[in-house]
Image (cartoon, grey):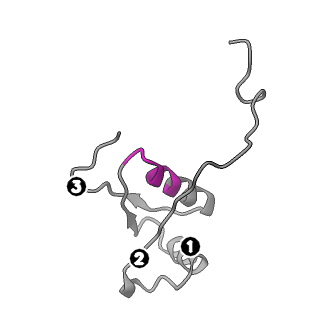
Amino acid sequence: MNYDPLKDFVPISILGTNLFVARRAHLGAGENAQEFIDYVREHPGELNYSSVPATGNHLTMVLFASRAGLKMTHIPPRGARSR
């Protein structure tokens, strides 16, 4: 290769984002995103989330959890396969 993809390219646009987080009403994890983040941080590894592996939804949640410093377990839906 006669170029460095990390140095020779710059991002110009976000093509799309999607992240929908729902929780069980009885969980008591707050009413907004910050309260949810705080709850997950206080209960590391105790919460699960579900998405089809290697999809935009899955990768977006991985990024969200990583940036927010959250520790949750990914549970793929039964019968779900990567594309």
Q: Position of residue 40 (x, y in %)?
A: 50, 72
Rendered image quadrant of residue 73: bottom left
Give the magenta part as a residue range: 53-61
Q: Position of residue 74 (x, y in %)?
A: 38, 56
Q: Residues within 10 Å of mark 1 (few under 14, many from 20)?
A: some
Assess whether mark 1 and mark 3 are in contact (beta carbons under 8 angstroms): no
Rendered image quadrant of residue 67: bottom right
In the picture of the structure, the residue carrying the numbered disc 1 is 37
Q: Position of residue 66 (x, y in %)?
A: 57, 56
In the picture of the structure, the residue carrying the numbered disc 3 is 78
Assess whether mark 1 and mark 2 are in contact (beta carbons under 8 angstroms): no
In this rendering, would 30 be left or right of 25? right
Disc 3 is placed on an element classified as loop
In this rendering, would 31 be left or right of 27? right
The residue shown at (49%, 61%) is: 71
The residue shown at (21%, 50%) is: 79
Give 13 or 49, whichever is nearer the viewer: 13
How many marks can you see?
3
